[in-house]
Image: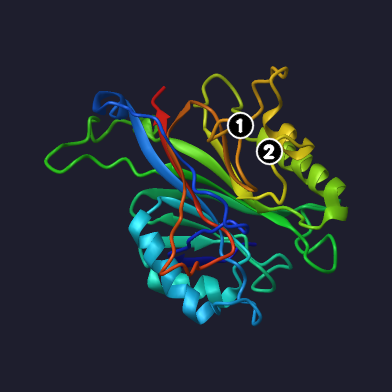
Amino acid sequence: MMRQYHVMVCLIFVGLFTSDITAKVEVDQDSKEKGKIVTLMTYNLKFASPTFKPSWEVRRDMQVDMIQQYSPDVIGTQEGLKGQIDYLMEQLPGYVVIGEGRKGGDDDEHMAIFFKRDKFRLREMHSFQLSETPDVIGSGPEVNPRMVTWVRLSLINKPAEGKTYPYPSDYRGHWANTQEFYLFNTHLFNRRDQAMARLNSAKLIMERINFCNRFGEWTKERPVFLMGDFNTRPGGEVYKTFVGDKNTEDALLLKDSIKGGSGIDWVLYRGNVEVLKYEQVDYNVNGVYPSDHKPIYVEFRLISL
């Protein structure tokens, strides 16, 4: 069972100080108003290693500052230990955080998800292990097991200031206008000899994502987002498992938020969604970065059905 904290979060930097990438799609104001805007960030915090420089005590306030500058609606983090997650939670009270350690409870690295408390209502949350027994938390390799944390969120449908709700007080179908989506956050195996483990993990994640298909015609389609550190680059078998290739026609596959993919940190999606902006965040203080990964920040429009 997953722990819930009240929190705020992280920054990002991609392990190899690669060139910065920003992709924008210019969208006019009328188009933006046709759907809800949601901003997502994936960020490998770099665990509080005593040998990594700068130390966590130096990096942590840089991460808080970066998050405050970008103010993403939802953040998927990787590698954060309990103390790191707790610190971000304390400094960023506008967020709620859910997630547990890779070995259950507070033990080991967390696959935490932060979301803005004033924008979303939590409908559902869970985690599963990237192993032969995915529902057994902590299963898999004794050292560095891997997992997925996922949520189903709904946008809080509040009228603008001075406006009223479009429904009479006794109307029983008003919840039909609430936009929901799923978000999965993960960190795949990292060693070169674990290529098969990464591929099988990708297949398992897709199986779990496909359970989120709508049940019947009366069920509103919910977009799905998958983010994380995949420890492999676009073009390989793991990437193709998620998004296919130019010859693949499968409505259940995901799309990348940047054409052709980039790096090892991805934000993938499926559903009635439009990418408005993609940015690899080059946040640093006098050339000092708060992690060995750069965050990926993506602005989406959830298109009203």
217 or 97, nearer to the observer: 97
Image point 58% across, 56% down: which residue? 14
* Alpha carbon separation for disc pair 2 and 1: 7 Å
Q: Return the residue at label 1.
A: 260
Quadrant where the image shows the C terminus: top left
| Circle 1: residue type | Gly
Residue furthest left in the image: 162
Q: Return the residue at label 2.
A: 234
Q: Specify which label sits upstream in the sequence, 2 or 1.
A: 2
Colour mapping used in the image: rainbow
Indicate whether 234 appears above or below 77. above
Label 2 close to label 1 by CB (< 8 Å): yes
Quadrant where the image shows the N terminus: bottom right
List x then y, in percent, for residue 75. Answer: 49, 54
Badge 2 element: loop
Image point 37% across, 54% down: which residue? 70
Q: Where is residue 178, by image quadrant?
A: top left
Indicate whether 242 appears above or below 193. above
Horizontally, is 261 left or right of 5 in the view? right
305 or 114, nearer to the observer: 114
List x then y, in percent, for residue 47. Answer: 62, 71
List x then y, in percent, for residue 12. Answer: 51, 58
Indicate whether 157 appears above or below 84. above
The 10 Å Cα crowd at callout 2, few under 14, some 14 to 19, many 20 or more, is some
Image point 66% across, 70% down: which residue? 105
Indicate whether 177 appears above or below 105. above
